[in-house]
Amino acid sequence: MYEGLEPDFEEMYYDLDSDFEEMYDDLKPNFDAMNDKITSEVEVIVTDRDIALMNAVEYVFPKAMNLLCLFHICKNVKAKCKMNVFPKNKQVQIMEAWEALIYSYGEAQYYMKLSIFEGICSTCSIFYDYVHEQWLIPHKEKFVETWTNRVMHFGNITTQRVESAHWSLKRILQDSIGDICNVWETISSMIVLQHNEIIASFEKNIIQKVHRHSNKLYTNFCGVVSKNAIDLVATEYDGVKYVGIDQNECRCTIRTTHGLPCACEIAKYSMIPHSIPLDVIHVWWSKLTFHVNVSSKPSKLSVKYEIDVIVKKFEELDVPGKISLKGKSKVSKRDTLTKHDPSWWEYVDASVRCSGTNACSTITTSKVQKLAPRPSVQKLTPRPSVSKVQQPTVLLFKDWLPVEIHKFIDNIIDVGDDGDCGYRAVAGLLGMGENCWAFIRQQCVVELQEFMSHYNIIFGGENFVR
Ligand SMILES: [Zn+2]
């Protein structure tokens, strides 16, 4: 590359080379860390049908789903249609059939729409062969909704945003004449501008109030979740009156593609009525800052360290000690009506804290309770992410319930069995945590007293109400 250069220049280039290598060596660990982070976290990449680029994506991001830009595919298909299909009203008919095909929501519907599309295209085989061979056969999973609706793409199914940023850059650069310093400065100031715009949009999301979002269902979202996300949830809420809690009718697309509650989910909250909990929203929508929030990455949580500590502790003990420690995990008696038994992970937490301070060698139930109170039902049962939703979950006690209501069962929680289980279940369902059962009980008494005459009729006499 440097052959033919004047000796002075050649030397300068070699100096640059060695400086660059040194700099590269210094920065390499950062590059590697960044690369690992990006390749492990990127789940979806949208590109145009550029085979070299698609191969590169497959190589660098083997776990990522490569979607194809729907906008550009439709442009190509439309152009081909204009060139090969006549008369003009036939073009309109074909493009309508094409749209119905790409927006089909299930495989059965896709193949039905495909046969309709094929029938309409029977007189224009060149166009049909093009669409079939260039797009549908090799790439349908990358742009037809039947398949893209299974991917968490947060609404990014075209490359428009990138194209628009590219267009802005080209407009600022104006022409390709200019030294690298000018270009660098221009790109740098553009990125600073974009960065500021994003920060401003974050602030808007946090501060601005929108009338449409004043519904009590969204109480937990205001100032915490992106306005776009609340808008999408509000649109789903509009569909509740048609869908109800029927999952088949709902199709739950917004849940799988955006990580947001769909109509059938919202229906359950609106029936109670109860504001939608924050943990059913994908963390991506609540990221209104550039700072990394460790608590917003539940997928990174692990109990490996805590389990290792318990195993190590167990192995260090003598036989009676082992029996004692093992027995702790089977404690089932309740001390009093208002206290509860700690979960196994509370033992783990307590054990880790004790081993860190050397303050205790064995764990007692009372100590554990002080260290780690049982969280509310809401915390115990966070809504699983979409990838988890798709996996079949085993619900204990489901078989005890009539088969007819199985399809309406979303989750089963085993609340405390101290005689107040009914109140505990209601408190848990309302998101207060089952330990607020006494409050529910009190509210029931108030309700019965206030409307005694009505309940007398319902229960068949005052004696039954009292
Ligand atoms: Zn749904």
Image: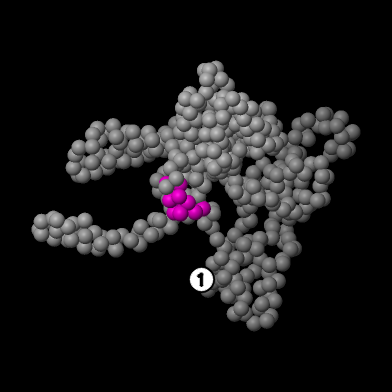
Assign the magenta stretch its main secondary structure: helix
Q: Position of residue 191 (x, y in %)?
A: 31, 41
Quadrant of the image for the C terminus? top right
Residue 200 in view, yes or no: no
Q: Position of residue 449 (x, y in %)?
A: 78, 34
Q: How is the image coloured?
A: one colour
Q: Is mark 1 within 8 Å of ligand 1?
A: no
Q: Between residues 402 and 186, which one lies in front from this camera angle?
A: 186
Secondary structure under badge 1?
helix
Q: Between residues 173 and 361, which one lies in front from this camera angle?
A: 173
Task: Classify residue 448 as left or right of residue 85.
Answer: right
Residue at position x 65%, y 38% from top? 107
Task: Classify residue 109 as left or right of residue 38.
Answer: right
Q: Pointer 1: residues within 10 angstroms few (<14), some, or many (20+)?
A: few
Residue at position x 51%, y 71% from top? 357
Residue at position x 64%, y 82% from top? 318
Q: Is residue 305 above or below residue 278?
A: below
Q: Position of residue 329 (x, y in %)?
A: 68, 67
The magenta region covers 53-63
Q: Quadrant of residue 32?
A: bottom left
Q: Which residue is outermost to the bottom?
A: 318
Residue at position x 88%, y 38% from top? 463
The residue beneath circle 1 is 357
For badge 1, the amino acid type reads Thr
Quadrant of the image for the N terminus? bottom left
Queried whether the magenta region covers residue 54, the answer comes back as yes
Q: Position of residue 441 (x, y in %)?
A: 74, 43
- How many numbered marks appear? 1
